[in-house]
Amino acid sequence: TEAVAPAVTETIERTLILVKPDGVRRGLSGEILRRVEAKGYTLTAVNLLDASPELLAAHYAEHEGKPFYQPLVDFMLSGPILAVVAEGQGVIPGFRSLAGATDPTAAAPGTIRGDLGRDWGLKVQQNLVHGSDSAESAAREIALWFPGL
Ligand code: UDP
């Protein structure tokens, strides 16, 4: 009997990373991307931009109506954002693991938010980075931030 080659159908996973305005302002873009690359992920697109209110409304649609929504959008409008597409096996949960818990005060040492985040008194808003939380979110968010990809 002939050996059947195992189907290698590993699809390359992509995620959307945002270095939020606090990260860009504090000069941490390089340090954050260094960690992403050091982990072995590949950067496939980068864009430094001032996000529009429309883009942010679409990006954060799931949070509309929550008390932190408008302050969050205002914060995201406060300066340039570095949008990045990174790819690699398991990059979606992998980057969220690199990022750490949403609240920088609670985020573990060794994570981006745990090592570098300073959100004391700022309602968990200025936590340096965003990372897509599922394959569906990643596809939706990459289409929003990189319409050409
Ligand atoms: N956020 C906030 N207050 C909250 C919860 C969230 O300002 O009580 C902000 C924070 O910047 C967070 C973003 O809203 O990164 C999106 O929230 P989510 O729960 O999706 O957290 P994440 O996936 O970024 O860890």
Image (cartoon, grey):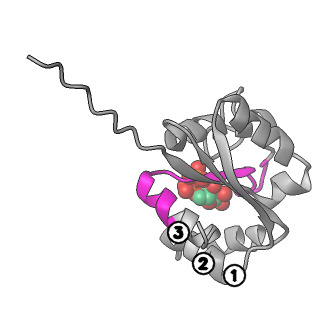
Q: Can you see residue 97? A: yes
The magenta segment is 119-140
Badge 3 residue CB within 8 Å of ligand 1: yes
Amino acid at the residue labelled 3? His
Distance of label 3 from label 1 (alpha carbons) = 14 Å
Dividing the picture into quadrants, the one containing residue 73 is bottom right
Badge 3: few (under 14), some or many (20 or more) residues near its Cα, within 10 Å?
Answer: some
Q: Are marks 2 and 1 in contact (CB under 8 Å)?
A: yes
Magenta span includes 81: no
Q: Position of residue 80 (x, y in %)?
A: 83, 66
Magenta span includes 132: yes
Q: Which of 54 and 143 lies nearest the eye of the viewer?
A: 143
Badge 1 residue CB within 8 Å of ligand 1: no
> Which residue is located at x 60 percent, y 40 percent?
95
Residue position marked by numbered label 3 in the rendering: 63
Dividing the picture into quadrants, the one containing residue 104 is top right
Distance of label 2 from label 3 (alpha carbons) = 9 Å
Helix, strand or loop for disc 2: helix
Q: Position of residue 19 (x, y in %)?
A: 75, 54
Residue 61, relative to residue 90: is it above or below?
below
In this picture, residue 143 sits left or right of residue 19 = left
Q: Could you say which disc has been placed on residue 57 in the image?
A: 2
Amino acid at the residue labelled 2? Ala
> Which residue is located at x 76 percent, y 56 percent?
122
Q: Quadrant of ligand 1?
A: bottom right
Residue position marked by numbered label 1 in the rendering: 53
Residue 117, relative to residue 23: is it above or below?
above
Helix, strand or loop for disc 3: helix
Distance of label 2 from label 1 (alpha carbons) = 6 Å
Q: Position of residue 64 (x, y in %)?
A: 53, 75
